[in-house]
Amino acid sequence: MSTDSSDPQAGGTRREDAHPTDARQRRAELDPEWQRAFAWVEQELGGEIVDFERQPRWRPAFFVDLVRDGETLPLYLRGERGELDHGANPFEFEAHVFEMMEEEGLPVPHVHGIIPDPKMIVMDKVPGRIDLSTAENEEERVSVLNHYMELLADLHAIDPKRFEDLGVKKPKDAEAAGFADLATWEANFRAAKNRPEPIIEFVYGWLRRNVPKDRYEIACLQVDSAQFLFDQGRVTSFIDLELATLGDPAADLAGMRGRDLAEPLGPLAPAFEHYFEKTGARIPKEVIDFHTVRFNLATPTTCAPFVIEPPPAADYIQYLAWYWVWSRACVEVIADAMGITLDTPTIPEPAKSGFSPAHDWLVDKLAEIRSGTEDFVKYEVDTTWRTATYLKRVESMWPEMEKEENAEIDALLGRVTSPLDREAELEAFVLEHGAANEEALLRFFQKRCLRHEALFAPVARELKGKKTQLL
């Protein structure tokens, strides 16, 4: 799942003019819970916090410089997801995975402890950066990615019992290994489901019809794979292990295809070959394809309730983009596996209406405010500006697109549908007749995804026009 693509354990460089007195003054302005967190760090680790910086994002996180015994210890404090929690594992689980991997000799941040109130993991701030698109050159990109594949093979070689000791259940048979943690994500999805979800139900059906039943390979998995820090051609640390589990090693290769949508990794086929050489075992394309669809589905199922009832802390457009881009990624991989060439819809140009001046004014005003703010406030204004830009295009483009889409739904169902019942009827059709109409539904869902992506295209940023790498 790729709903947290900007979450490094690196960054927060100390300012040259940082001074303990200044840090104390700024600290006094923090909410009481963060003051308690800093006090815990000083008491439990010893020393004084001389500088800190809040990471500008929805999830609470701080970069902290702690001075003890005359030396500066750079730390990263990672908080809970709050109302955006996916509920896959307890908060403390990730810290225990880091500790186990460190014992196994893999590069991970050293965990110093867990703050009980507010809950935060205290870990080393590891040198390095995320996003291979920032590699100095192609040689460094290849070197880093190959190193990651070697480390991933080392992770997969760890005795699965190490994860079982952390409470992870080992899949009992081939089908369970194929589904991996699908049941957890589906349970969360169904508990939070707040509208018909035809495309998600279609993909669930396809997965159940195509789960590998003659392959039982179990390994320790990163799950949300290809999340790492790198520097000078080498991986310096794994990051984001909160979803780690046991399952088919093919799942981590599949996860890299999902990660590539948000953080470009470059050509994956050569990297996979490097992994096969390291392990001495080739994984069939159809198995990687299956796990790619399964992994990608976790993103729209997680985002679905937030798209309809977005919490105040959410970057609405980011969640909307994750929902549609990863839904399309599922469709494209299924179609490729079936040898189907997909269609693209007609995307109309924005049309002016009597309401356009108000939309234009709102977007321009938010852009002006956004340019004059800094740090966390800028993040919040930016998310509001992105949403206003999206709504401006919805008002000017969606009416024409909706007419075309409604006609396609009527053609699929063989009857004229009404606005109030259309989505529920489409979902019912998918559940009852999806297996017999896979090609027609894939073609329709591809066009539906592309239409919605066109609405937020100007603010899609790193997700604009992204496609899953086909094998």
Image: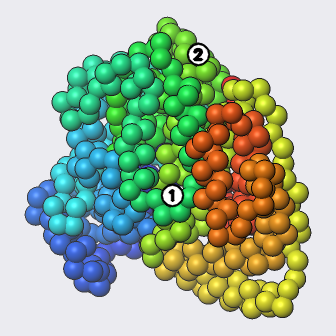
Farthest-out residue, front:
415
* Marks 2/1: CA–CA distance: 30 Å
Q: Amino acid at mark 1?
A: Cys
In the rendered view of the protein, which quadrant contains the C terminus? top right
Q: Is residue 398 left or right of 26 when viewed as pictured?
A: right
Q: Amino acid at mark 2?
A: Pro
**Image point (49%, 8%), residue name:** 280
Percent position of residue 19, x then y: 31, 75
Q: Secondary structure at mark 1?
A: helix
Q: Looking at the image, do the residues carrying marks 2 and 1 touch, with CB atoms under 8 Å apart?
A: no
Residue 436 seen anywhere in this rendered image of the structure: yes
Percent position of residue 424, x then y: 60, 59
Q: Earlier in the sequence, mark 2 or mark 1?
A: 2
Pointer 2: what residue? 284
> In the figure, residue 178 lies in which quadrant?
top left
> In the figure, residue 292 lies in which quadrant?
top right
Pointer 1: what residue? 303
Percent position of residue 341, x then y: 82, 34
Tag of residue 430? none
**Looking at the image, is 100 positioned above or below residue 400?**
above
Residue 324 seen anywhere in this rendered image of the structure: no
Farthest-out residue, top:
280
Q: Residues within 10 Å of mark 1 (few under 14, many from 20)?
A: many
Percent position of residue 201, x then y: 56, 46
175 and 367: which is toward the camera: 175
**Image point (57%, 55%), residue name:** 197
**Image point (58%, 44%), residue name:** 431
Q: Secondary structure at mark 2?
A: loop
95 and 340: which is toward the camera: 340
**Image point (76%, 78%), residue name:** 395
